[in-house]
Amino acid sequence: MNPAIPRGAFARRALRRHLLGLALALAVSPSAFAQPAAWPAQPIHLIVPFPVGGPTDMAARLVAEKLTHSLGQPVIVDNRGGAAGMLGTLALAQSKGDGYTIGLIGNGLVTLTPYVRKDVGFDPLKDLIPLSKAVDIPLVVVENVALPPKTMKEFIAYARANPGKLSYGSDGTASLTHLSFEMFKQAQDIHLVHIPYRGTAQILTDLLGNQIQVSMSGIAGPLPHIKSGKLRALAVTSARRVPALPDTPTMIELGMKDFDITTWFAFFAPAGVPAPVAAKLNEHLGRALREPDVIEKLRGAGMEAAPSSQAEMDRIVRRYIAQWQRVIKSANIKLDD
């Protein structure tokens, strides 16, 4: 012992070295403390707010199969139909934000319905986290071939010359197709009579029978009638032309520069999901949606795979919310009870 150093100082130094060594040992020992299990450590539930068998369900099952393989845990599709999709969307918003419940939710359910109804029970911007866009379904404006106009420009001129004499069908009051057509009417200063329906099938029946003269809907429904010459495609509403109708111009090409509207579906999670888990979900969802077989099967059902970043999806949600609120206010649209 160095006689110049007091005995107590040696004891204190020895104690500090002992404690430091113990701390280092605990830090590197995997069993020192209970560590949270690496995500995912259990099956993941994918809520689809519609019944089994529709296009949304098909898209969800395609992606769920890919995620099951890439994440190493079963991804179980949970169909929660009812109230036009609101029951399943509410169930997702009220789920625990632990990364084990996600949902495939449509545009109108997060950017439209919550802003025209007071009883939805959730706030899309507070209660849901965008993970990635899944698919785009471009809309096509179609008319009965008995009408004289052959192009969109001719249709606009014809509608202006015949105010209130033409009618259009939508999927219902305050639906995405209703608001999209109102946006078109406002941009072109034309007057068309709105006829709300409960679904595309009845719209097509009345359009083919000339009970209504024009409609705007997803491409899959009217496409066979366009190909057979019974309906005429005037324009698509997406930013780019669609492979199924390569000769049909976009609204943007026709001079409506802000008319980029699709029926999209996106993956969301409940608020509270840890950022690293959300980022991992985004990565694996994007990987699944870029698989060639997934792209091909979705396209066959009238959908275009459209994976995105979380930030991009958040911007899309906010843009659509602002857009629809402007249309709702200017057209004085109220949702029927």
Image (cartoon, rainbow, N blue to C red):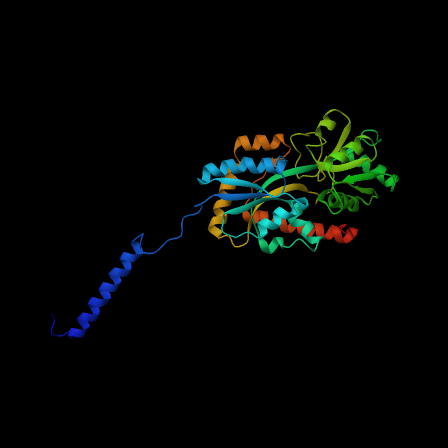
Residue 191 placement, left or right of 303: right
Residue found 74% across the figure and 34% down from its top: 201
Residue in the picture at 62% in, 53% down:
124
Depth order, front residue of 76/147: 76
Q: State the quadrant of the N terminus.
A: bottom left
- Residue 317 placement, left or right of 200: left
Q: Which of the 4 quarters of the picture holds residue 119?
A: bottom right
Q: Nearer the viewer, residue 44 or 171?
A: 44
Q: Could you say where residue 276 lies in the image, as x and y percent from the top left?
A: 46, 50
Please tell me whether residue 140 is drawn above or below residue 27 in the rendered image.
above
The location of residue 172, given as percent across then percent down, is 75, 43
Q: Residue furthest top?
A: 228
Q: From the top left corner, tell me how far across and down residue 14 is, in percent.
A: 20, 67
Answer above or below: position of 46 versus 22.
above
Total labels drawn: 0
Left or right, residue 174 beside residue 131:
right
Q: Quadrant of residue 295?
A: top right
